[in-house]
Image (tube, rainbow, N blue to C red):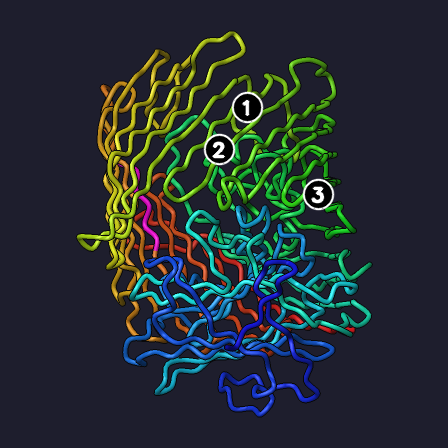
Amino acid sequence: MLLAVNHSFAQISAKAIRVSTPPNIDGHINDAVWDEAFKIDQFVQREPNPGQAVSEKTIVSVCYDNNYLYFAVKCYDDPKKITAKEMARDVSLGNDDRVQIILDTYLDHRNGYWFQIGPRGSIGDALISENGASMNKEWDALWTGKSSINSEGWEAELAIPFKTIGFDPKKTVWGMKLIRNIKRKLEASYWPVANLNTYRFQISDSGLLEGLEGITQGIGLDLSPYVIGGMNTKRGEKDKYHFDGGLDMFYQVTPQLKASLSINTDFAETEVDDRQINLTRFSLYFPEKRDFFLDGSNYFKFGIEGDDNNPYRNSVSPYFSRRLGLDDAGNMIPVRYAAKITGTQKSWNIGMMYVSDERNYGNSNLSVGRISRNLGRQSSVGVIGTWGNAVSNAENMVGGFDMKLATSRFQKNKNLAFTMFGMLSRTSGINDKNSSWGADIAYPNDFLYFSLGHYEVGENFVAGIGFVPRNNIKASYGSFSLGPRPDKWGILQVKSGVGFNYLTNFSDVMVTRELNISPLGIRFKSGEEFSYSINQQYEFLAKDFLIYPGFSIPMNQYTFWRQNIQLTSAGGRNLAGIANFSTGNFYNGRRHDMKLTINYKVAVPLYVGGNYTQSHVFLPEGDFTARIYQMNLNILVSPTVTLYNYFQYDNASEKMGWQSRFQWILKPGNEIILAWTSGWSQPGSQWIMNDSALRLKLKYNIRF
């Protein structure tokens, strides 16, 4: 037996062994120090065979010194059968074999740090919140991980600096969860045991990591200066050269509370947004991709935003970080400086941010504050406030209150959560109809899943730095599904369900109604998936709606039905893809949609991926087809040296975008980045570059 059980807490535990000589992190478990480390080998499947032992022997070793927590992972397997296509940092390893480590450093059973590593050295990290219901995969931390494939399978070593994570130095026990994924078998095995009703990354059922004594974050100060140079070009204009610099500072005010200051903030390495076809009357939601705003973003989530499974979580957001340092079109606005404080203090969760940018409209000084207090094991109550307006010149403030009552022990092992919130906005010249409130109950479990919610947004409610696509509405929504696992015919799980969304205005006139019927969704043990759904939609248009350049939908009431089929191939194959087709009536015409995604791993260093999205709409005055082409061409020299190329074209703007990013990570925090972004058009028979921006950025990190 390689495990100990802590009977007083009824939780399985492991002991971190202090070592005097650190291991050499090279992906080969051959250092003598690993003989001293505590070993964990009792992994149990969550899928596809719940309760059975992991099918391939797995051993995780743990040790630490003053500055680092070390892991060694030994994954026995047939090396010819290992699924290992990815090498770059922070890419999705959902289609690769991998090991994941979750650390609940405050032992609050709610929040955690997530680390993963694959057989070819690809590493990734994330922040887990809301007891696993929410995951911020865009968060980046400074740590090291290396791996290698050998005759016995694959193995990896990880070194996580205590300076990288927050923790309570008075606590010598952390929560810990370990997961091994074997992709070809669709196998996910956990330590400790995890049942199917839990979230994949649930925190509350973690094991314990004991014995962490005398660990330190040092002074807790990080300085990250950068210099940047480059050139901007625009057709018909003289080239402009760009030279600049800035500084990012991070200071652990306490081991649990971090202060950040960014001067002359730069986002040269940020990925461009994916283009989307918008055939609705409302703004689309684009995710945040900038590191400064992603770090600690979980501390600013409010109301139903904390549940990633809720499709309406972005319907009423008092704070939306893309309002800061970006214009309405998603173009960068220079940020003079930005400051924030995030973390916990005892049972309090704190998020404060102030940003000063150089926008020429609205307010250039924008602030948000969010404080919540933990109640019981998983419940909380909190407030939020925002100051500033990025959508108009009017002065704006928003204040809000929310409460979450949650448990992961309903009927012994099931999740149940109730959330409610209320907000009031104050905008110059507006004194009524300026509130918003809502409530939601969710039962997100494997066999039976249901949710029911309601929210209202007043006609004059304004979230100056938030995201509220529709005003003057009262919305009720819900969903119900069953997911049996027949364990025959090669089927892993079958899902069937219904969902609805019903919206009226404050005159109780129905403006939107959506009914979704999903009679059949199948996950096969081979990795393939199939789903079929039928959707009915009602829309009340009080005025004509310009749906596409040159095409309008006249004001009227419309009810239409659509059908959707999606086929997904096993992602572990070198050639994999997703095909989605939908067809049916659309307002006063018809619409046929198609989306194809293809990923091809030519060889380990070369990845080619493509997306094709098409919407063909037939209306009485004619028809049009909206198309988007997207392509990735990535060269992965090593986990630390990568070249990404991303191409996009849409026929509405008739413009192509091309971004190339070369990244060389000399060591965590020290990087060389060369990024080139360009815009192209085709007025005749040849493509012409209209504009471009070339940037060379050098980043350096100093830790005290």
**Image disc number at residue 374:** 3
**Does the magenta run of residues contain 580?**
no
> Residue tagged by mark 1?
455
Q: Is residue 659 left or right of residue 570?
A: right
Task: Report the amino acid beneath label 1.
Answer: Tyr
For the residues bearing labels 3 and 2, Cβ distance under 8 angstroms: no
The image shows residue 376 at horizontal and vertical percentages of 68, 42
Q: Quadrant of residue 7?
A: bottom right
Nearer the observer, 75 or 462: 75
**Image disc number at residue 312:** 2
Q: Is residue 46 above or below residue 637?
A: above
Nearer the observer, 206 or 157: 206
> Alpha-carbon distance for marks 1 and 2?
10 Å
Task: Report the amino acid beneath label 3.
Answer: Asn
- Of the residues under marks 1 and 3, which one precedes in the sequence? 3
Residue at 66% from the left image edge and 78% from the top image edge = 64
